[in-house]
Amino acid sequence: LFSAVEMAPRDPILGLNEAFNADTRPHKVNLGVGVYYSEAGRIPLLKAVELAEKTRAEAHAPRGYLPIEGVGTYDSAVQKLLFGADSEIIKSGRCVTSQAIGGTGALKIGADYLKRLLPDAVVAISDPSWQNHRALFEAAGFPVQNYRYYDAARQGVDLEGMLEDLRQLPRQSIIVLHACCHNPTGVDLSIEQWQAVLKVLQECEHVPFLDIAYQGFAEGIYEDAAAVRLFADSGMPFFVSSSFSKSFSLYGERVGALSIVADSAEEAGRVMSQLKLVIRTNYSNPPTHGATVVGLVLNTPELNALWQKELGEMRERIQLMRKLMVEQLAAKGAKRDFSFVAEQRGMFSYSGLTKEQVDRLRDEFAIYAVSSGRICVAALNLNNIDAVTDAIVQVL
Ligand code: LMR
């Protein structure tokens, strides 16, 4: 049965973890996967999460099946976080939200539902994008194209190229957009640029699919949802996949959500009935723990404030690491100006290192990065940053 099965390539991001875990060099550093590590080099368990888990454990709650769309109080808290508590789309009921198995799970159920809704559509993702975007939409049966996004020469956005490519796609194409903290580049659209993109999407009747996995890692929870609110105000239908993996440091709990904004509450109700069919045949209904904990934190004012404070501390530590990285690389005589690293947003720096340089970092220095040159700045700390900047200077 399996004699002709070929070995599949390792996942470009999670495959790095496998190689990193197998590496026995004690000084190894993992700058591959998008995970925040504390100054002590550990994945933090947030205090707000710890307190909510205590409450939950003490309640001895039964673990029955959840509704197909997950924990209701969690779903409504997600909407408030994305659109703002006073949002018209929440009041009108034209947005439906379902708990999902992480941000990836939200993309997956969204993609499967879209395949039923628009079977002949084209999907367009930014060039470059998170590697799993292409794989995931192709696995759902869509042809996937790139639209121009990152201009390496300017270390900024190629807005003209992006708009031109979006205009040339067939009407009603599905456009995947990073709402903040673009992965892998760390380069986001300004609000004026978002307005220009939105105008083209409306003209072409494209279907925006906003992916927001790093809300709170650029400027703040409210600020980082500016693009989502812009789309909400536009009146056009759109999809949002969101994740608490990073912002709650709950990677393994797989806590995400898919929100779909329709024209009316009645339409949204029909959409949700279809989405439930997709979920039921994928994984039936979601797990209880992570979303209950996140829901408790979001819906309890003191825990919510504590969480936002802890998230702010993570954000500030990343910004400090960016600053130190730029300073150290300059002081060590790096053959390139790295000041752009301080301007990039979120967990990543698109360093400009080539695949060969990334290979050397791994082979000679036990420093793991994604082959595209993406470095997870959130994994740097005062103990490893010296070794990392030394190694970068060496491989340049
Ligand atoms: C990443 O880009 O490293 C993260 O989103 C983790 C993942 O699933 O790839």
Image (tube, rainbow, N blue to C red):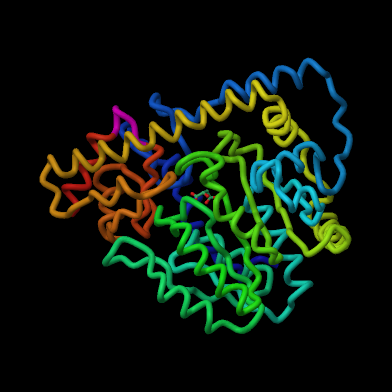
Q: Is residue 382 magenta?
A: yes
Q: Residue at x 40, y 75 (%)?
A: 160
| Residue for point 45% across, 28% down | 313
Residue 279 place in picture, x, y as percent: 80, 55
Q: Residue at x 49, y 30 (%)?
A: 43
> Magenta segment: does it hold 62?
no
Asked if residue 150 is positioned above or below residue 335 in the image, the reply reads: below
Quadrant including the C terminus: bottom left
Q: Is residue 337 left or right of residue 170?
A: left
Q: Residue at x 68, y 28 (%)?
A: 297
Horizontal relation, residue 255 to residue 389: left or right: right
Position of residue 23 relative to residue 143, above or below, is: above
In this figure, what is the number of numbered marks?
Answer: 0
- How far from the left and from the top, in percent, is residue 256? 67, 45
Q: Looking at the picture, tell me which residue is in the foreground, 320 or 119.
A: 320
* Image quarter of the N terminus: bottom right
Relative placement, left or right, of 47 versus 97 is left
Lateral position of residue 387 relative to residue 24, left or right: left
Q: Position of residue 171 (x, y in %)?
A: 64, 82
Q: Which residue sits furthest top? A: 58
* Magenta stretch, main secondary structure class: loop
Q: Position of residue 124 (x, y in %)?
A: 56, 72
The residue segment tinted magenta is: 380-384
Above or below for 2 versus 87: below
Q: Which picture quadrant has residue 38? A: top left
